[in-house]
Image: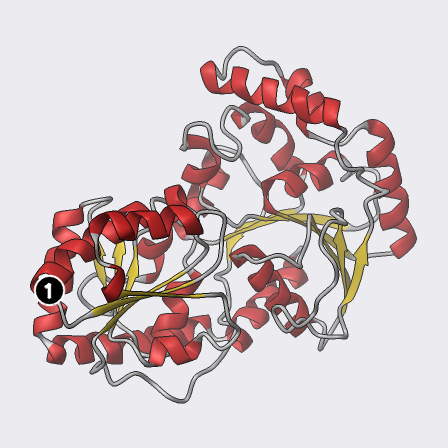
Amino acid sequence: MNICFITGTIFNLGGVQRVLSVVASELSKQHQITVLCTDSNFKQDNSLYNLSKDVNVEINNNIIKPKSFRQKLICKFVKAMNNINKEILNEKILMASYYPSKSELSRLIKYLNKGDFDYVIGVEGYYSIVVALISKEIRAKVLGWEHNSYFSYFENKNKYYWGQDLLFKKYMPLLDGCIVLTNSDREKYNQILKVNNCITIYNPLSFKSNIKTNCSNKNILFVGRLLEEQKGLDLLVEVFNFVVEQKDEWKLVIVGDGPDYKKLTNLISEKGIEKSVQIFPHTNKISDYYINSSILLSTSRWEGFGLVITEAMECGLPVIAFENSGPKEIIEDNINGILVKHEDINEMVMKILYLIDNRDIRLKLSKAAIERAKDFNCNVIIEQWNRYFSTI
C-alpha cells in the first residue's frame, strides 16, 4: 500500500512527532510511506526519533503556505473573539481564518493525486479537517488520526479547537475513518461527531527494555515537554515540595525540554528545593532514567494518551497519575499503577509517601505494569493498523 501522512512537521520535540516517527518507520517495512510536512521551519533530522530512512519525507510549504503577518493578526483576533463567546463567529469566518484557501487545497489535491496514494492520513484535528475538505476530490481513502482527547479538543476552554464544534461536526463525517487514542474518545467521536469507522488504536512503545527497575533508588521521575499548564509543572513542584519535607533523601528527576523551562526553575527556586531536583534535557536513551527510578509522576491537567506512562510500564516503573482521559485508559487503579483525583495535590502526596514507605507495593505494581506494557508493543499496534486499513 501507498500511504501518506500529512502533518506540520515530524522534526520537532513532542509526543505526536515521536509516535508518528515510530508508526511510519514500522509501516515502511511493509508499505510505501510518505510524510508530507507543510512547515519548513524545521530541518530534516531522522535521528531525533530514529525515523527510518525508508520513510519518504517531503518538506513543502508551497502547498499550504505559511500565514503572512497580516493573516496571523487576523487569526489572533478571531481566536480572541472566539474565546470571549464561541457563538459569535460563523463557519465561514473560522474556515477563512484557520484553514487553507481554495488555491492551497487545489495544490494539495494535485499533489496527492499525483502521488497515487491508497490512504491519506491527517495527523491531528487541523489536518483531519484539511483532508476531509478534499475527500471527494482525491482518489485515496482519507483518515483522521487524533492525538488528544475529545475534552482537550472541544471542552478545554480557549485551547485547541474550542469553538469549532459545529465545524468538526460538519466535516469529520466526510472522512473514511478516524483513529483515536481511547475508547471514551471513540464513543464521543461516534455519538457527537458522527464519524465513520472510528477505532481506538493505542500509541506504540518506541522501545523495548529487557532491563527493569528494581524500585530501590530514591528517585521520583517526571518525563515530558516543559509546558506548565498542560503538564502541570506547577502541580509537580508543589507535590514534590510536600514530599521532600518528609522524605528529604528522595530526589525529583525531571527529563525534558520546552518553553517553560525558566518558569519551572523559578518555581523550584521559590520553594527552595534546588538541591533535591535535577533537570536533564530530552534524550533518546530515556529508558536509563526509568530504570534508575522508583516512581513516575504524571501531573498533566490533560493528556490524550500518555506515552511516558506506557514507557515507564515497559521498564517496570510504578506510575502515579492525575486522573484524565489518557491515564484512565492505560492504568487500572491500584493494580498496575495509581490514579489520583484531578489536580488533588494532597491525595497525590499521600500516594507517593505510601509507595515510598512500601517497596513491596512498588514491586507489585511494577510486575503488573510490565504485563500491561505488552498491550502497547509495537508489533501489536502495527498489526492493528494493518487490520484497520483492510477494513476501509
The answer to whether 163 appears left or right of 253 in the picture is right
Residue ID at (55%, 48%) = 146
Image spot of residue 364 (x, y percent): 18, 78
Total count of labels: 1
Question: For the point 33% across and 44% down, which residue is it?
Answer: 301
How far across and down, in percent of the image, does residue 333 sit? 21, 61
> Residue most toward the top?
88
Q: Nearer the viewer, residue 102 or 387?
A: 102
- Crowdedness near tag 1: few (<14), some (14–19) or many (≥20) residues, C-alpha within 10 Å: some
Q: Nearer the viewer, residue 384 or 319?
A: 319
In the image, what residue occupies the spot 26% across and 52% down? Answer: 237
**In front: 376, or 88?**
88
Residue 166: percent from left, percent from top: 55, 23
Whether residue 38 is situated above or below residue 337 in the rendered picture: above
Q: Is residue 244 above or below residue 150?
A: below
Q: How is the image coloured?
A: secondary structure
Specify the amino acid type for callout 1: Leu
Residue 285 visible in this rendered orientation of the protein: yes
Is 270 positioned to the left or the right of 246 in the image? right
Residue position marked by numbered label 1 in the rendering = 353
Element under label 1? helix
Q: Is residue 383 left or right of residue 65?
A: left
Asked whether residue 1 appears in the rendered view, the answer is no
In which quadrant of the rendered image does the N terminus lie?
bottom right
Residue displayed at 48% across by 75% down: 377
Q: Position of residue 225 (x, y in %)?
A: 46, 55
Tell me the quadrant of the picture where the C terminus can be found: bottom right
Quadrant of res 280: bottom left
